[in-house]
């Protein structure tokens, strides 16, 4: 998030504004806004309606949190790029910036959404490692 | 239904938690708006209390909307 904030001026110069969404309450999000110096809005979807409408609600964790994802949306609200990520940093900020600059110039974006064929494998590996290291936790309803 | 199936698959495979998430997400991907589709409009308060709408965020040309896990 701090990486995005550091490039905010570059995004704005390319005609793109930034916003981040989580299910955090304003009281939770504001410290991040202040302490990390995030200069773009952190939107608070405590009711989880927006996260749900984007199909990104991960109900298995803590009453439902967002799966990390990034969308580039044009002024007609058409989605021009979508990245569904295990961690938000998987598409780098620089790649996104390059993409937005391409789009702004009307050039076919050189950054393509990465196929997700690989990452479930990575997650399974990680899950196995976690299970071995920490044991298996039974989710509490 | 899918979720239960996925959870069963995942726990059978020995990945009760993250495994199920991954499978559920893959199955649910059709619920995530795709490139070329219209992004659902939203209106949310930011951490300072100011209300923001997607249509305003994109009005300058483009909007980058990031979903993050949050602090919890």
Image: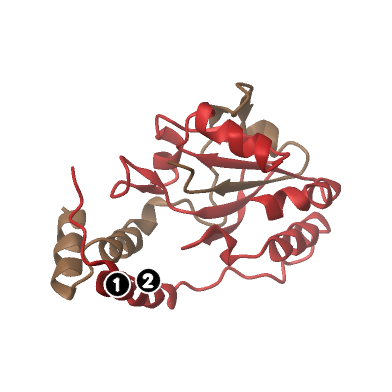
Chain colours: A red, B brown
**Residue B38 located left or right of residue B62:** left
Nearer to the camera, A120 or A134 = A134
Quadrant location of residue A123? Answer: bottom left
Which residue extends farthest right? Answer: A13
In the picture of the structure, the residue carrying the numbered disc 1 is A133
Q: Secondary structure at mark 1?
A: helix
**Residue A27 located left or right of residue B9:** right
- Give x and y (percent) for residue A37: 71, 41
B61 to A130, vertically: above or below = above
B61 to A132, vertically: above or below = above
Give the mark nearer the N terminus: 2 vs 1. Answer: 2
- Residue at mark 1: chain: A
Please name the residue shown 49% across and 54% down the image. A68
Please name the residue shown 35% across and 59% down the image. B25
- Give x and y (percent) for residue A136: 20, 64
In the picture of the structure, the residue carrying the numbered disc 2 is A123
- Give x and y (percent) for residue A131: 26, 70
- Give x and y (percent) for residue A128: 28, 75
């Amino acid at each position: 998030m701090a990486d995005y904030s550091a490039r905010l001026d570059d995004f704005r110069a390319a005609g793109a504004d930034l916003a981040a969404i989580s299910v955090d309450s304003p009281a939770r999000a504001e410290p991040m806004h202040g302490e990390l110096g995030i200069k773009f809005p952190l939107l608070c979807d405590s009711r989880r309606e927006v996260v749900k409408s984007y199909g990104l609600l991960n109900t298995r964790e803590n009453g439902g949190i967002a799966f990390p994802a990034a969308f580039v949306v044009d002024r007609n609200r058409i989605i021009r790029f979508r990245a569904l990520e295990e961690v938000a940093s998987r598409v780098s900020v620089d790649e996104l910036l390059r993409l937005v600059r391409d789009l702004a110039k009307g050039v076919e974006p050189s950054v393509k959404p990465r196929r997700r064929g690989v990452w479930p494998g990575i997650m399974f590996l990680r899950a196995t490692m976690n299970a071995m290291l920490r044991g298996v936790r039974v989710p509490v309803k | 239904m899918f979720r239960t199936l996925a959870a069963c698959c995942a726990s059978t495979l020995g990945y009760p938690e993250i495994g199920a998430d991954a499978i559920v997400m893959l199955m649910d991907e059709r619920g995530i708006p795709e490139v070329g589709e219209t992004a659902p409009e939203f209106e949310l308060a930011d951490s300072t209390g100011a209300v923001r709408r997607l249509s305003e965020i994109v009005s300058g040309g483009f909007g980058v909307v990031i979903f993050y896990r949050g602090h919890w």
